[in-house]
Image (cartoon, grey):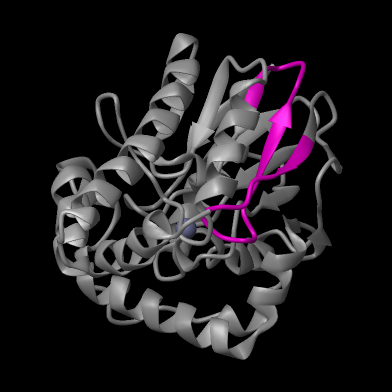
Amino acid sequence: MFTLTNVGAISGSDAFLLVTAGKTALLDSGFSFCAEQMLDNIARVLGERRLDYVLLTHSHYDHASGSVYCRKRWPEVQIAGSAHTARVLAKDSARTLMRQLNDSAAREQGVTHYEDLLAELRVDRIVSEGDEIDLGSMQLKVLELPGHTRCSIGFYAEKAKLLLGCETLGVLSDSRLIMPCCLVNYEDSLRAIERVAKLDIESLLLPHTGLLQGPACRQFLADARHWLEETRRRIREANAAGKSEADLIQMFKDLFYTELVRKNQPEKAFDLNASYIIPLLLKES
Ligand SMILES: [Zn+2]
């Protein structure tokens, strides 16, 4: 009925290709500097078919940068994202930041030269809650799932019992250990997890984690909720005991910066994210 293939060029540069009988869609699009390799991976799966959609779960550079390279290879592709993602990607300041982050990730990988197309970044189709994306034999319903960012969305195919999730739901750090990724709102993140936990899901695709199937989907969402609430409880307890913000960030790091997360997230990016998450966990709701 559908296939889902990891076409990401390197770890951390996540991109998954969804192929149905009618249409093809790329979920997230990775970095700029290794986009060509991703395009080759996509083309190998597609054969004679073309790429119809790029679906962006949010505007972060490691998810959205590769989209513009897809348009160069498949000019008719429609890049879909939330209104907030469209606003972010249209800003020069955001593109500059994305360029800097791509350059730094490229250097870490020993890449010194790559084609920079970020000036042409844009969302072609703005989608919001309840909108449907027609993949022929599959309809994807848009779910707004803010919490990781304001612009985060997911896509649900009811008949196929498939949820294409986003980082608001958390990232697998180790077996049964899910790192909270609420960079903008704790309550929204909790609501998003509760909301999708009520859906009938047999396949769950998660950025930086991959495809879960069967009972593992429900287990992930239960663990995600547990760790979001438990991390908040632990951080607040340590804060009440007089720990400094630096201590709390270290606590978060000791718990979640595992080998698995290290593969996807440079230390600088992890530290920066933790510096957003800790104050949110301390904030009174
Ligand atoms: Zn992100």
Q: Is residue 9 left or right of residue 17?
A: left
- The one nearer the camera, 234 or 199, is 234
Q: Quadrant of the N terminus?
A: top right
- The one nearer the camera, 32 or 63, is 63
Compared to residue 272, the image places residue 37 above or below, namely above
- Provide residue 97's location: percent of width, then percent of height: 46, 83
Q: Quadrant of residue 208?
A: top left
- The one nearer the camera, 34 or 191, is 191
Residue span colored magenta: 141-162
Examine the rendering and report whether any part of residue 121 can be seen.
no
Compared to residue 83, the image places residue 101 above or below, namely below
Rendered residue at 62%/53% (across/down): 152
Q: Is residue 81 left or right of residue 13?
A: right
Rendered residue at 28%/57% (across/down): 265
- Provide residue 242's location: percent of width, then percent of height: 15, 61
- The one nearer the camera, 47 or 4, is 4
- Provide residue 114's location: percent of width, then percent of height: 40, 78
Examine the rendering and report whether any part of residue 285 can be seen.
yes
- Provide residue 12's location: percent of width, then percent of height: 35, 53
Compared to residue 238, the image places residue 92 above or below, namely below
Rendered residue at 63%/54% (across/down): 56
Furthest-top residue in this view:
215
Rendered residue at 27%/61% (across/down): 270
Q: Is residue 31 left or right of residue 142?
A: left
Q: Is residue 83 left or right of residue 241?
A: right
Verify whether residue 83 appears in magenta.
no
Verify whether residue 152 appears in magenta.
yes
Q: How many marks?
A: 0
Compared to residue 40, the image places residue 195 above or below, namely above
